[in-house]
Image: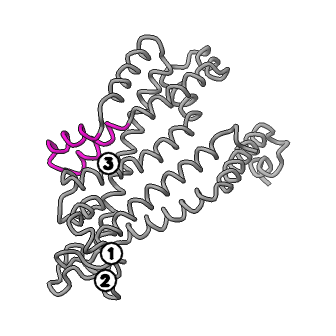
Amino acid sequence: MSRSATTLLDPRAAPGLAVRSAVALSQKELFWRQFRRHKLALAASAVLLALAAMVLLASWIAPYPFDAIDPTQFRKPPSPAHIMGTDDIGRDLFTRLLYGGQISLAIGLFSALVGSSVGTLMGSLAGYYGRAIDNFIMRVTDVAFSIPSLPLLIILSSYAKSAIPIMILVIGLLSWMSTARIVRATVLSIRARDFTLAARSIGARDARILLRHILPNALAPIIVGATLGVGGAIIAESSLSFLGLGVQVPTPSWGNMLQDSQSTMSSRPWLTIFPGMAILITVLSINFLGDGLRDALDPTLRS
């Protein structure tokens, strides 16, 4: 038997490796044990996985093209042929809900990615360097917090001509502040620990210390913040589309589907209920998932 195989089978041959493996395994077990206790987070995960699968497979699941118009099926209520009914010009609502989910979820995910990346960068620099840099970044954060986000989103979106990449960038750049504050507080705590001081004492560069030692230990708040940011970005996109400044028809999104139905809420409620429920269930599930991740990643709650 080779030496490498003996090492894998006999922990005494490589005690350091065995200890690291046991620690890593125990951390994973503790995470899943704590996450499984959060029943709402488990249910939310299942709902989000099912929703993501349906949205990604929309071209196979949807019974009609999203822009197909049937003149004989104007304003029809739910039926076997159209399980969620049709809109004012005869388009299948279920089909448009699936394709609209692709747009709304993509905007939510990528906007949260932009916001989390900017917030992590700003918070890391402020927490690690401190003093003048910390003071400057935090004052910029305070100013950004003081600006009403929705009016600014409306103004910027009107200039962006509702382009989806620009909308993602705008929403992301208006949602980094909370992540920056959380990451700053975490980095302030981690930079004073022994392993960070040891890395600095042997001459490690600041970039290496941040990327290899500090940020890996600050992933928990970053992951939770990014998860919750997805829900906020979906709400922001839906609000803009509802006001007619977001995704433009005929491309469907949950927000512009609500905007199309606002004049017929009482006479044709299914046009409002289904996209509204899609937004509600998605954002609620994301929030429950964020709560579960926060509890599972918090070492003080593990047992």
Q: Contact (CB < 8 A) between labels 1 and 3?
A: no
Secondary structure at numbered mark 3: helix
Spatial separation of the CA atoms under disc 2 and disc 3: 29 Å
> Which residue is nearer to you in this view: 270 or 194?
270
What residue range appears in magenta? 150-175
Residue wearing tag 3? 236
Task: Assign the magenta stretch its main secondary structure.
Answer: helix
Work out whether residue 257 or residue 2 is closer to the camera in this orientation and state it.
Answer: 257
The residue under label 1 is: 94
Residue 54, x across and y down, in percent: 41, 70
Q: Which mark is residue 82?
A: 2
Q: Position of residue 277 (x, y in %)?
A: 39, 65
Say what amino acid the circle numbered 3 marks: Ala
Q: Earlier in the sequence, mark 2 or mark 1?
A: 2
Q: Would residue 285 be found to the left or right of residue 201 on screen?
A: left
| First-in-chain label (2 vs 3) | 2
**Residue at the image point whose x is 24% and y is 73% from the top:** 66
Q: Is residue 263 left or right of residue 237?
A: left
Residue 281's place in the image compared with 195, above or below, is below
- Residue 70, given in percent of the width and then of the height, sits at 17, 83
User: What residue sits 43% from the left and 64% below the top?
Assistant: 52
Coloring scheme used: one colour
Q: Crowdedness of circle 1 by 10 Å Cα count: few (<14), some, many (20+)? A: many
Q: Secondary structure at mark 1?
A: helix
Q: Amino acid at mark 1?
A: Phe
